Image (cartoon, rainbow, N blue to C red):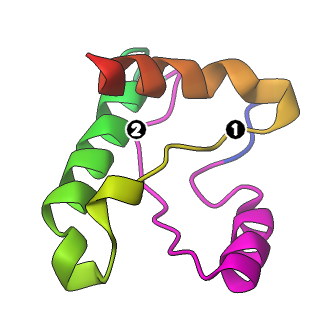
């Protein structure tokens, strides 16, 4: 069974956004197994690039972008996107 999507556990991020004045960008990505890696990580990275390129019009400070995501059980899924962004 596969469950979850780009809105999974979004409530936690929205709570933080309300408390700390953050902006949440939730990226739609091609899920596995139909689209095996690195497709999901590349989609998330493309979302990061798009957000950075449109930061001013979105009211975001591009120097303060953060990649986050994944639940405790799926923590490994966020690593590929972070690795792509570092290079």
| Residue 74 quadrant | top right
Tell me if residue 30 is in the magenta stretch: yes
- The residue positioned 17% from the left and 69% from the top of the image is 54
Query: If the image is split into quadrants, where does the N terminus sit?
Result: top right
The answer to which of 11 and 15 lies nearer the viewer is: 15
Instruction: State the extent of the magenta-drawn residues as a range.
Output: 5-33
Q: Foreground mark, 2 or 1?
A: 1
Residue lying farthest to the right in this orientation: 73
Q: In the rendered view, tell whether residue 11 sits above or below residue 58.
A: above
Query: Can you identify the residue that label 2 sits on?
Result: 30
x and y, in percent, of residue 61 in the image:
32, 69
Dot 2: element: loop
Query: Can you identify the residue that label 1 sits on?
Result: 70
x and y, in percent, of residue 77 in the image:
61, 24
Q: Main secondary structure of the magenta part?
A: loop
Query: If the image is split into quadrants, where does the C terminus sit?
Result: top left
Q: In the rendered view, tell whether residue 36 sits above or below residue 22.
A: above
Callout 1: 10 Å neighbours few (<14), some, many (20+)? some
- The residue positioned 71% from the left and 65% from the top of the image is 13
The answer to which of 15 and 39 lies nearer the viewer is: 15
């Amino acid at each position: 069974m596969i469950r979850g999507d780009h809105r999974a556990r979004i409530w936690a991020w929205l709570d933080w956004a309300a408390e700390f004045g953050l902006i949440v960008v939730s990226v739609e990505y091609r899920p596995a197994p139909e689209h095996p890696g690195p497709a999901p990580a590349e989609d998330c990275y493309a979302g990061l690039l798009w957000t950075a390129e449109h930061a001013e019009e979105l009211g975001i400070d591009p120097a303060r972008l953060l990649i986050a995501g994944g639940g405790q059980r799926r923590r490994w899924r966020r690593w590929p996107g972070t690795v792509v962004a570092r290079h």
